[in-house]
């Protein structure tokens, strides 16, 4: 039972829900299962029943995951491929998952950090690991541009996975792929659908702070967001679905404080923000004393779960950023917000499809780019 990945996921979720930082042992699951079992069943019978349920769950997840096992043409001179490292480094995905699990257990906010890291990688020069490169004395890299610094987190998780992979299969697994796997694992550990990541990305050779201009700011309105996602080949619907990642994680007060204190020349507080929510936010981010480190949960009710409450929040005028609340601003986008709010399964399916598509933006393949030995430096 210990080696079953689905059990591990359920176990991770159970540990999250109880707010308990434990290990991936089967004892936690056993405790929970025993607590809820019908009184007529002993542990052995319960295990049999659980196995049946898990087999069924596996079947359902396989049906849901329609993206598996094919090669995905991505332009340039190559394709991405599910199971790309199967021959060259068969442990690659398992090692990344272990490092993500380890990190998330010590700080579950890192799951959100890794999903955002993947997004910020893909939107700037494509998913080429350029966000991971450190600045040097003569170059300010993407990670030190204002949209990324100091808010991006999770770099050390990628470093740890890379170090293990280099000692196991040197020069094989790209940093861009490690990041795509880590984002997938983070979604899964947050209770989202599992999915297969087409891989085979190469790492880029360039990282410039000024190119982060292609990242949408939180002050964006609907047409700006739609255009910035269209620039990357993503539809308005995919933009709305991907924004659902804001159901996990945190924001620094500075990313939205203008909506609370300094909205316009006529009103200090954004009228599209629920006043009760605004006063709660003001307590967490007092105007007189906003420290650079102050943060709030973006989805205060369930900050570590990939659920639909981001969308119900928007419907209740509790979207944290202008870029969240603006999704209600026309009837067709509002209808999609409502649909995602009501239907978790549909949201998850759309999210998986959209994040897989996002992971293919302008990737380098074949002879392009390189496999970095250290994700922070070009070879
Ligand atoms: C639609 C346009 C988007 C805008 C304007 C936006 C903006 C932001 C901002 C300002 C923050 C808070 C940063 C901070 O102050 O700490 C944030 C956090 C976050 N964003 Fe977005 N974002 C967008 C789309 C996305 C997408 C497409 C994803 C992933 C698929 C994503 C995933 C996240 C996550 C997970 C966090 C929490 C990070 C953490 O806890 O460390 N965002 N976003």
Image (spheres, rainbow, N blue to C red):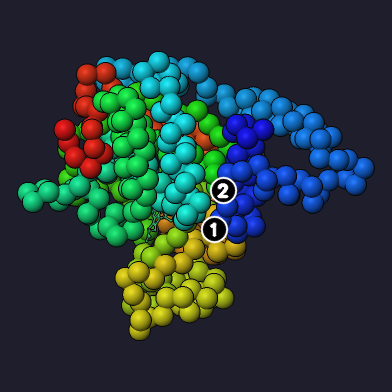
Q: Residue 193 at what x, y percent from top left?
A: 58, 37
Rounded to the nearest angstrom, the CA distance separating label 1 from label 2 is: 21 Å
Dot 1 lies on which element? loop
Mark 1 and 2 residues: CB-CB less than 8 Å, in contact?
no
In the orientation shown, which residue stands out farthest toward the bottom?
A: 288
The part of the image, by quadrant, that contains residue 72 is top left
In the orientation shown, which residue stands out farthest toward the right?
A: 40
- Residue sitting at x 65%, y 42%: 26
Task: Out of 300 and 173, give the one closest to the viewer.
Answer: 173
Q: Is residue 258 above or below residue 166?
A: below
Q: Residue 102 at what x, y percent from top left?
A: 47, 46
The residue carrying pointer 1 sits among few (fewer than 14), some (14 to 19) or many (20 or more) residues within 10 Å by Cα, namely: many
In this picture, residue 266 sits left or right of residue 211: right
In this picture, residue 57 sits left or right of residue 196: right
Q: Nearer the viewer, mark 1 or mark 2?
A: 2
Q: Is residue 176 above or below residue 300?
A: above
- Residue sitting at x 16%, y 49%: 135
Task: Out of 320 and 56, give the one closest to the viewer.
Answer: 56
Dot 2 lies on which element? loop
For mark 1, what is the residue?
303
Q: Which numbered tag is attached to residue 23?
A: 2
Mark 1 CB near ligand 1 (8 Å cut):
no
Instruction: Work out whether mark 1 precedes mark 2 in sequence or the reverse, and give the earlier one.
Output: 2
In this picture, residue 345 sits left or right of residue 289: right
In this picture, residue 246 sits left or right of residue 305: left
Q: Is residue 61 above or below residue 151?
A: above
């Amino acid at each position: 039972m210990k080696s079953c990945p689905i059990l591990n996921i359920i176990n991770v979720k159970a540990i999250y829900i109880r707010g308990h930082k434990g290990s991936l042992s089967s004892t936690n699951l056993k405790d929970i299962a025993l607590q809820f079992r019908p009184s007529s069943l002993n542990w052995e019978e319960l295990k049999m029943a659980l196995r049946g349920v898990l087999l069924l769950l596996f079947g359902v997840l396989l049906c849901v995951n329609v993206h598996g096992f094919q090669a995905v043409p991505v332009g340039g001179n190559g394709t991405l491929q599910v199971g790309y490292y199967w021959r060259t480094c068969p442990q690659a995905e398992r090692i990344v998952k272990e490092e993500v699990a380890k990190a998330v257990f010590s700080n579950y906010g890192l799951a959100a950090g890794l999903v955002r890291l993947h997004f910020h990688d893909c939107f700037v020069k494509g998913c080429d690991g350029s966000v991971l490169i450190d600045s040097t004395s003569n170059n300010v890299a993407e990670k030190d541009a204002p949209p990324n610094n100091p808010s991006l987190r999770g770099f050390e998780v990628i470093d740890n996975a890379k170090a293990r992979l280099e000692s196991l299969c040197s020069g094989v697994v790209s940093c861009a792929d490690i990041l795509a796997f880590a984002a997938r694992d983070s979604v899964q550990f947050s209770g989202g659908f599992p999915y297969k990541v087409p891989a085979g990305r190469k790492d880029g050779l360039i990282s410039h702070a000024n190119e982060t201009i292609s990242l949408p700011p939180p002050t964006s309105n609907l047409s700006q967001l739609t255009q910035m996602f269209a620039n990357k080949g993503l539809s308005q619907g995919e933009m709305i679905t991907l924004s659902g990642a804001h159901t996990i994680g945190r924001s620094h007060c500075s990313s939205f404080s203008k909506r609370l204190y300094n909205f316009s020349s006529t009103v200090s507080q954004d009228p599209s923000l629920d006043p009760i929510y605004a006063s709660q936010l003001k307590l967490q981010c007092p105007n007189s004393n906003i420290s650079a480190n102050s943060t709030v949960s973006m989805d205060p009710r369930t900050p570590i779960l990939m659920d639909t409450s981001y969308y119900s929040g928007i419907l209740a005028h509790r979207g944290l950023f202008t870029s969240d609340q603006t999704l209600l601003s026309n009837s067709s986008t509002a209808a999609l917000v409502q649909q995602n709010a009501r239907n978790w399964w549909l949201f998850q399916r759309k999210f998986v499809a959209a994040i897989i598509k996002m992971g293919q933006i302008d990737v380098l393949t074949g002879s392009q780019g390189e496999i970095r030995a250290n994700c922070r430096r070009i070879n």
